Amino acid sequence: MNFLSVENISKSYGERVLFSNISFGINKDQKIAFVAKNGTGKTSLLNIVSGKDEADTGQVVTRNGLNVAFLSQEPDLANHLSIEETIFASDNKILKIIREYETALNNPDDSEAYQKAFEKMEANDAWDFETQYKQILFKLKLENLAQKVTSLSGGQKKRLALATILINKPDLLILDEPTNHLDLEMIEWLENYFAKENITLFMVTHDRFFLERVCSEIIELENGKLYNYKGNYSYYLEKKEARIAAEKASVEKAKNLYTKELDWMRRQPKARTTKSKSRIDDFYIIKEKAHQRRNDHQVQLEINMERLGSKILELHNVSKSFKEKKILDKFDYVFKRGERIGIIGKNGTGKSTFLNLITQTTSPDSGKIIVGETVKFGYYTQRGIQIKPGQKVIEVIKEFGEFIPLTKGRQISAAQLLERFLFDRKKQYDFVEKLSGGELKRLYLCTVLIQNPNFLILDEPTNDLDIVTLNVLENFLLDFPGCLLVVSHDRYFMDKIVDHLFVFRGDATIEDFPGNYSDFRSYENSSIPEKKELKTSASDTNKNNWKNKNDSNKLTFNEQKEYNRLEKDIKKLEEEKKEIEAIFSDSSLNEDEINKHSAKLQEVIETIDEKTERWFELSDKIEN
């Protein structure tokens, strides 16, 4: 069932053309990601599809009565409302019934109103809906329902807007960077929610794990053309590489043919026959193809890093609190040369405060922080670049000098450096406030790196960066010889560049985990039963207490059989998933076969999730 059709739309701002004559459709239950470089109009396209903006040409046709919800990067919420009032402000019939019921509960003297409200809840099956919406609020850490919107942080507002949309269950959900401002636990919950729900999605996201696990189709805008990939992120990468190779081969073939036809053209007499005119027309088509050039320039990151000495950064008995909230408590750590540490933890556990302590923008309550004489910090903060009114892009870089030093004694001009960061000569003279969110981040990254740091501190560096820039940044950081400390909710990014993790558990508890994020998740998921088992064996010193130990296992005989069977089933399903994913490497698959295998893969993934969830339920019984 077709929900929405985009027909030959175009959008320009002055002379700048974002996209021209692009078309695609969104069908029921599709989960589509839209991928493009920063500055090519991703957000503009979402605004047009959602109805917030209009295209210069073409049209967007939606199905009659379609309920479309749009989560923008800057949600428009009423500041005077509370969290609860914001949620109940929608036209959702069930929410109004729940509101009536909760009002009746608060007025126990009016038994008639309570009875009517109760009957409405029963008649409309509102009990499950109430449970679901409260679970969504809990998962997104929006538990203080009386809190006013005006007092919320930017991240909390984004989460409130997301919660409101999820609760109202629209037919089509349009999302602009949905994982920004969510901690890792929230992102993983949202992934599972979208994977299980029969919901239609059209989104822009830089989160490649999210793309991998949620999306069943990717639409890419590149050099003004749309390309469709009927699969997840891994499938997209593979097929894109094959497409680029085929395009290069086609252009090379056209070049060879062009050389041959050019020679024929030069030998033709002025009086030409009809037959030769047809060949002449073909010549110009071949010429156009032969002169095609891929516009796939990548960011070039090259800095003149100052050498690190033997003493880098030392924290001795460092403590920090905000009133009753402890962030650090006698924390000790000595950084070594070339360390690459990722920082993870829930929002509010003190990750950004830790970075501010290291860079001495915040002072500890007690303890010492010693910074080596040769250390030069490069601090990429969440605040981003500070925009000055009327400032042009090139003027931002020229504040650091007309010429920028590179490695081996070389230097380049400010304009040349900006070109390496994908700002062409025309874009360099644009006003900074006109840049897209991703372009602002790329410019900010440029200002951090050109100061030649040898200790990079990155606080959420991947937000708003396009996938191309992310890949280049990752490759640069892999070769970066200095120290690296990074806070990020981008699991793909963390897996690629860090060696170990500081896990902020809250209440001044920080664990040093030896591995990347995927290692950590595997450990967390697998070690819970092991930890309980260790505790049991430590306490069961009496050989005669086997009966008590047996009593602690609360599984029935049938549940124990189910528990054992689930482990085998999950293992088989994981193997089946790998086999299906391997099928997609066959380039001879037609569209019908791809759709068939994609549907099967989605079914297997959903079954794995269901069985894993049940396995955890039974595990909890054993442990409690």
Image (tube, rainbow, N blue to C red):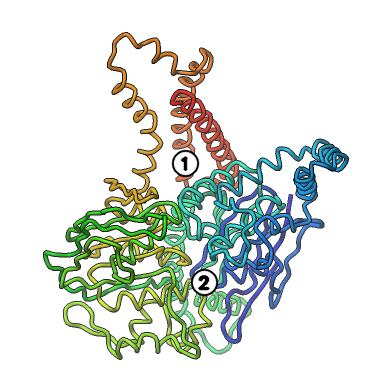
**Left or right placement of residue 492 versus residue 613 in this view:** left
- Look at the numbered disc 2 and give the secondary structure of its residue: loop
Q: Which mark is residue 581?
A: 1
Say which amino acid is labelled 2.
Asn
Q: Residue at x 31, y 26 (%)?
A: 534
**Left or right placement of residue 171 versus residue 206 in this view:** right
| Residue in the foreground of this view, choosing between 430 and 520 | 520
Q: Residue at x 55, y 51 (%)?
A: 141
The answer to whether 224 is drawn above or below residue 392 in the figure is above
- Read off the residue under disc 2: 223
Q: Where in the figure is residue 443, as x and y percent of width and height?
A: 41, 77
Q: Where in the figure is residue 509, as x and y percent of width and height?
A: 34, 48
Rounded to the nearest angstrom, the CA distance separating label 1 from label 2 is 29 Å
| Residue in the foreground of this view, choosing between 211 and 497 | 497
Figure quadrant of residue 546: top left
Say which amino acid is labelled 1.
Glu
Q: Where in the figure is residue 112, as x and y percent of width and height?
A: 88, 40
Q: Where in the figure is residue 197, as x and y percent of width and height?
A: 63, 43
**Crowd tier of the residue under label 1, counting other residues whose Cα lies within 10 Å: few below 14, some 14–19, many 20 or above:** some
Decide if residue 230 is in sight here.
no
- Furthest residue toward left: 310
The answer to whether 326 is drawn above or below residue 566 in the figure is below
The answer to whether 56 is drawn above or below residue 582 in the figure is below
**Left or right placement of residue 347 versus residue 216 in this view:** left
Decide if residue 375 is in sight here.
yes
Do the CB atoms of the residues marked 1 and 2 lie less than 8 Å apart?
no
- Furthest residue toward front: 109
Q: Earlier in the sequence, mark 1 or mark 2?
A: 2
Figure quadrant of residue 451: bottom left
- Look at the numbered disc 1 and give the secondary structure of its residue: helix
**Crowd tier of the residue under label 2, counting other residues whose Cα lies within 10 Å: few below 14, some 14–19, many 20 or above:** some
Q: Residue at x 69, y 52 (%)?
A: 27
